[in-house]
Image (tube, rainbow, N blue to C red):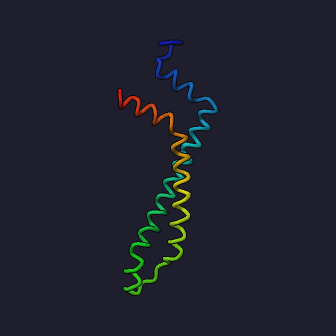
Amino acid sequence: MENGKPMKYQSMAKLSSRGERMGATLRMWVSIVLFVLWLITGISGVFLLIGPLAAKLGIPLPVSLMDTLHIYLGFAFFGLSVVHLALNWPAMKSYFRRLTH
């Protein structure tokens, strides 16, 4: 106990600095955008998977649009995943370090 506060609360107080909050906000938004990209890429993938069957049944699906979305959003997903890894690298390093010891 230091300064009348338990140690875990002191480290949390350090996290409340402006720079750390901005970093946490950036990580949050990157994670949210990654989730949305994952969702849209998955939905477009399902459209591409069932497109030929739907065409045989006479159900028109926007396969061309879904193909374009799937490709470009897949590239965006990959690029943002690299950013996500870079932003969360210290936390992952700490996690794996604790896992191995």
x 51%, y 50%: residue? 81
**Image-quadrant location for residue 48:** bottom left
Q: In terms of depth relative to the viewer, which is nearer, 17 or 58?
A: 58
Residue 52: x %, y % from top left: 40, 80
In the picture, which quadrant includes the C terminus?
Answer: top left
- The residue under the point 47% across, 58% down is 38
Which is more toward the observer, 42 or 10? Answer: 42
Question: Which residue is drawn at the image coordinates 50% and 72% (left, top)?
Answer: 66
Instruction: Count the labels in the image.
Output: 0
Which residue is drawn at the image coordinates 50% and 78% (left, top)?
62
Front in this rendered view, residue 17 or 64:
64
x and y, in percent, of residue 27 in the image: 55, 43
Vertical comparison of 48 with 75: above or below: below
Q: Report x, y in % for residue 71.
A: 52, 66
Residue extending furthest right? 18
Residue 95 horizontal side relative to residue 36, left or right: left
Measured as percent of width and height from the top left, residue 14 is found at 57, 25
The picture quadrant where one finds residue 49 is: bottom left
Say above or below: 16 vs 59. above
